[in-house]
Image (spheres, grey):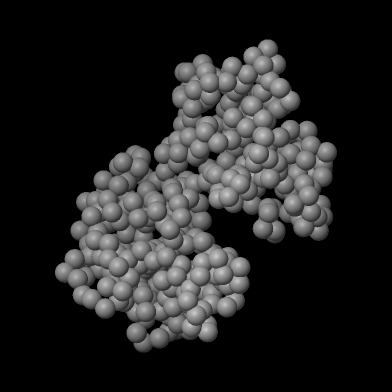
Amino acid sequence: MSYTSENPLRLGILREGKTPPDQRVPLTPDQCVLLQERFPELDIAVQPSPVRRIRDAEYASVGLKMQEDLSDRDVLIGVKEVNTEELIADKTYLFFSHTHKLQPYNANLLAEILKKRIRLIDYELLKRPSGRRIIGFGRWAGLVGAYNGIRAWGERTGSFAIPRAIDCLDLKDMLSTAKGVKLPDDLRIVLTGHGRVGQGAKEVLDKMNIRSVHPDDFLRMEFPEPVYTHLDVGDYNRRKDGAAFDMAEFIAEPMLFESTFMPFAQRGDLFIAGHFWAEGAPFLFTRNDMRQADWSLQVVADISCDIDGPVACTVRPSSIDDPLYGYHPGNEKECGISDREGITVMAVDNLPCELPRDASDGFGQELMEHVVPLLVLGDADGILDGASETTLAGELNEPFLYLADYAEQGK
């Protein structure tokens, strides 16, 4: 469809309705203004919200329409899942739906989307032709996750206390707080992940002036200062038959590989898990591994938060209000976070919510650059189509036909 200033694309910004409340927004007020200046054929309205960190008055002050009823909008954008009772029929929605991996708690959401003939474009599925994801909050999860890991060390040892990330004014304040922390001279940190999450975590460690060392040196040398090593996939996986590591082969046939993470677990004190893990890939460590006498890790900040998965001490997600729990390898039960025989675990599964203004601004920049132009001007490369789980006809898009039984279960 071709849009003009007389017949614009009517875009609505949803308020977040999940519990606990999410304070993020998909577009900031200034970004909305810039988009309307760039695209005269775009008309934006904002649904009022009492929970956003960016207040309604900030949107209204730049001349944006505040509109409770968004039924006149063509496209509705939010961040997290929309409550089923609030879905408006015959619209296009963009949000993180958490449905394409058959998440059982959202089967009813997909069923209702189909019933109401909604086109669902899932941010997580927006990809370039190369297959690389276009948009996400990964960097922010990494930034907050690494900070929370440092904070967890202070909580476990009682050596220092710093505020939660959500209680910091913004990213600058959080990084300044982290930089002021005095860490033990012999602290050894292991970081996994070279994607957005891992690079975000690395930003925090570098801002704290923690020295980065090669994985081989981390394992064989002593250091007179805190250090961290940043592991790539080939640093903690190997082929079972001893052949050379090949990343393409690891992705295609992960069952051919086994974990080599244990030497790092025997030398590190704090582990920041920022790696992507796919079904079938080796676990980094098991519950039995944690019972070995030479196990060394005391704190695990599991940003990826795969429950009962590759980081075996992550037995449940934690929350922003209560971010830490202890795991006792001996009895495989939770314990106090300062238990000397336990491991302190940080497994908050919505980390970017702790920096809502900054995360919203970063996310909105990506929307402005890579997504909104496709909505207004057209999707010549099929990027939006490839991320559309459903159609306006109330059907599953062809690549997502595997969700049929899942959606049926949600009825």
In the picture, which quadrant includes the N terminus? top right
Q: Is residue 288 depicted above or below 317 in this figure?
A: below
Where is residue 375? Give x, y as percent. Answer: 64, 31
- The extreme left residue here reads 224
- The extreme bottom residue here reads 293
Residue located at (40% from left, 46% from top)? 166
Q: Is residue 261 visible?
A: yes
Where is residue 290? Give x, y as percent. Answer: 43, 80
Q: From the viewer's perspective, is 365 left or right of 86?
A: left
Residue located at (27% from left, 73% from top)? 217
Where is residue 151? Give x, y as percent. Answer: 32, 58
Q: Is residue 218 depicted above or below 75 in this figure?
A: below
Residue located at (46% from left, 55% from top)? 195
Q: Is residue 319 depicted above or below 335 in this figure?
A: above
Tell me which corner region of the image, top left, top right, bottom left or bottom right, holds residue 4.
top right
Residue located at (58% from left, 26% from top)? 46
Q: Residue 291 or 203: which is nearer the viewer?
A: 203
Tell me which corner region of the image, top left, top right, bottom left or bottom right, holds residue 45.
top right
Q: Residue 397 or 47: which is nearer the viewer?
A: 397
Where is residue 113? Give x, y as percent. Answer: 76, 43
Q: Is residue 323 visible?
A: no
